[in-house]
């Protein structure tokens, strides 16, 4: 299915969009590890449910960079980054999509140190089409469940990575 243009949004719009979904989760990994996983586009297919493809478009990373992702049954989305603050914030607006459910869409991921781990706050803002408005209550619940599951999957992946990279301290020989 061909991608159609969506109206880009500003970062501040996401919080006040007509349709908003949000979650807050604790991840037992430091913000640097969580952000590194966010920045590694290809890794998303291992921990984000329904994501079958994720790739940066070009070598650029940061605000203004673009990424394309495909979600099973939901479509293909081209994202342009609004915020890319290592260990703190990862936010984008969707500029093209094969989905017919929205005319504007953005996501904002914020990371805050919380004990030995990270508080992960996510906000998704959308302006739905006619069909999207009819499906909005169910879609919001679905997206909240999807992101909660993604956060738990990411935590499991990061925990497994820590376990495989742990090295026992060397013992001294006397």
Image (cartoon, helix red, strand yellow):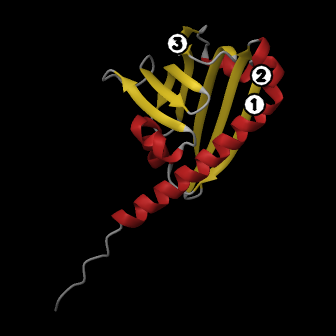
Q: Give residue 140's quadrant in the image.
A: top right
**Lateral position of residue 45 relative to residue 98, left or right:** left
Label 2 or label 1, whichever lies nearer to me, is 1
Secondary structure beneath dot 1 equals helix
**Lateral position of residue 60 relative to residue 21, left or right:** left
Residue drawn 45% across the image and 33% down it: 53
Asked if the residue at tag 1 contacts the one at tag 3, i.e. Cβ–Cβ closer than 8 Å, the answer is: no
Which residue is tagged 3?
A: 3
Secondary structure beneath dot 3 equals loop
- Whole-number angstrom distance, CA of label 3 to CA of label 1: 21 Å
Which residue is tagged 1?
A: 139
Of labels 3 and 1, earlier in sequence is 3
Of residue 82 and residue 106, the one placed in the foreground of this image is 106
Callout 3: 10 Å neighbours few (<14), some, many (20+)? some
**Lateral position of residue 62 relative to residue 76, left or right:** left
Which residue is tagged 2?
A: 19
Residue 81 lies, in percent from the top left, at 49, 21
Residue at far left of view: 174
């Amino acid at each position: 299915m061909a991608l159609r243009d969506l109206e880009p949004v500003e970062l501040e719009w996401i919080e006040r969009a007509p349709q908003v979904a949000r979650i807050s989760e604790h991840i037992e990994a430091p913000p640097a590890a969580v952000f590194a996983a966010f920045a590694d586009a290809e890794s998303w297919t291992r921990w984000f449910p329904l994501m079958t493809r994720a790739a940066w478009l070009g070598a650029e990373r940061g605000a203004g960079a673009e990424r394309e992702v495909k979600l099973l049954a939901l479509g293909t989305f081209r994202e342009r980054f609004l915020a890319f603050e290592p260990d703190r914030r990862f936010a984008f607006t969707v500029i093209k999509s094969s989905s017919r459910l929205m005319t504007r869409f953005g996501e904002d991921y914020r990371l805050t140190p919380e004990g030995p781990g990270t508080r992960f706050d996510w906000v998704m803002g959308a302006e739905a089409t006619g069909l999207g408005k009819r499906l909005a209550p169910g879609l919001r619940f679905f997206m909240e469940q999807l992101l909660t599951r993604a956060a738990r999957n990411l935590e499991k992946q990061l925990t497994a990575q820590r376990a495989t990279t742990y090295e026992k301290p060397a013992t001294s020989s006397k």
